[in-house]
Image (cartoon, rainbow, N blue to C red):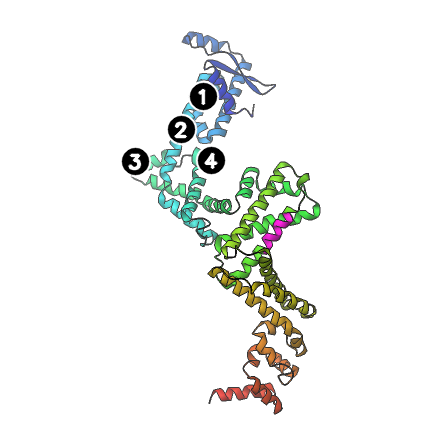
Amino acid sequence: MSGISLNTYGNIARQDLNARLTLDTQNNTLGADGRRNISNIFTRAWDCINRSDSQIQSNKAVARGFVRALTERYGKEIADTLSQDLSAQLSKGRPLTGYRIDRVIAKAERLTTQIQASNRSLLTKQHLDLMTDNALHRLGDDTRPDVLTRQQARQAVHDAIVNSEAFQKQSFYNPLHVIMDVFGDDGEGLAQQQFYDHFKSMSMPAVDHAISMQLAPETTALVDQHGKLVIDQVCEGVAPQDRGQVYSIEGHALSTAKELLRSQDGLNPSAAGVFIGTIAYVDSSIKFLAGLDPSQMNDTGKAYLQAMINDLSQILDKLTDRIGLQGLSGQERQALIDINQDAGDFEQGVTEGKPQDVAQNCVELQDRLRSSLDVLHTIQAQNDKAKTVLETIIQRGEATRTIAGNLPIAFQNGLRPTDLLAGDPEPMLLRLGGDGFDSSDIAWMHQHGLNVSDTVTRFTLEQVQSLKTQGLDIETGLQRLDAEAHI
């Protein structure tokens, strides 16, 4: 006998307290057969003597099923306690009656209330604060209050604990602790420590979930309802070549953007490029998801796809607001994205040792950067955050355009891409070629492990020309500079 819920037992009891429950083994259902005999002790004894072995076994099965249902609802601790009230039914096979079911369920409710009240007394402010601090620390100690305040984090930890099955069904202040208190030991203190040790691991997932509910509420709610693999319901309805991108968007676009919003303020220049890059990623992810055909998805897949689009759209607005650029037109935002992307691609291409491939596209790159920079120069920053971001991206774009324009000259003079990116390129390139340092000088610096940018910019343009006019190499020039420095 299995699978019969406590509600089924309770419904029979409410219909007739005097009913005796029977089991239909073929259909695995409960029924009522006869009525509870309450006339006198002799009648009940006669009824017990005349009970067949099959009736006894059936009654025991009904009682065991009731205990299983109690365990599912109230937990093992309460079910074990209540089994004592069912000893006659479990061991001797007496009928389980509606009256007994009603009394046992009522007692279970009282025990549950007592356990939860006892556990609430162990959930001290000190322990709740410690668990909240632990969660925030493990997340990085930098969760922004406009995403989740400390009080909200504390409430999330509290709710996760009190709504857990262990809190509702397991007593952490038990008779052993009572005995310890009686004999002068700190039983309550031990119970509090055991309570803390049991629940502290819940704190970080609880806070992380609260952050997700703030930043991506729709997808988080559907994951809570359908499980972490709900994304499969989307992927099963899209073309095979699109599935990897869908998984990537859920696994990276959502999580990366949420982490950025959780921890970064976007005010410092180093974070500006990260924000712009993330905005570009989120924006392209929204467009990709919106272009999918949901007709082959089930209802859950369709709902989760729309939830991803909605949450990413909200995140995109938050990212833009965070850096003060919420008023930009589509063209202005795209110019920011393009400069950030072009500069990043150029730097990556050069530093990965593919300068010739990069050099072939320098003219086209300069034209794109010039066009995007013209757009950004027309923007009037409305706040300090926007000013910082605009200045950072403009400076990055202009520096990249200068480097791209002089890259062929650098190659002609033997300059390595890493030399170009290690210093200020413009003053360095002015001292190379023509009347300046030539390829042999660059080769000498490489041979002696000197930083080319730092070395050549020690000389003024006039000093470089003087050295070359006299036919002196850079080594002699450096010796002269060092001698002059000690005078």
Task: State the separation of the CA atoms marked 3 and 1.
Answer: 31 Å
Asked whether 198 or 237 is in front, the reply is 237
The residue tagged with tag 4: helix, strand or loop? Answer: helix
Which residue is labeled 2 in the image? 111
Q: How far from the left and from the top, in percent, is residue 446?
A: 62, 78
**Secondary element at tag 2:** helix
The part of the chain drawn in magenta is 280-289
- For the residues labelled 4 and 1, say whether their Cβ atoms are less than 8 Å apart: no
Residue 449 seen anywhere in this rendered image of the structure? no
Residue carrying label 3: 182
Which of the two discs, 3 and 2, labels the residue nearer the N terminus? 2
Under mark 1, the amino acid is Leu
Could you tell me if the residues under marks 3 and 1 are in contact, i.e. CB atoms within 8 Å? no
Q: How many marks?
A: 4
Pick whichever, 62 or 306, lies toward us.
306
In primary-sequence order, the first of circles 3 and 1 is 1
Q: Nearer the viewer, mark 4 or mark 1?
A: 4
**Secondary structure category for the residue under label 3:** helix
Q: Is residue 171 above or below residue 235?
A: above
Q: Earlier in the sequence, mark 2 or mark 1?
A: 1
The residue singled out by tag 4 in the image is 165
Q: CA distance from mark 4 to mark 1?
A: 24 Å
Task: Confirm whether the magenta stretch covers residue 288.
Answer: yes
Q: Nearer the viewer, mark 3 or mark 2?
A: 2
Q: Residues within 10 Å of mark 3 (few under 14, many from 20)?
A: few
CA gap, disc 4 to disc 2? 14 Å
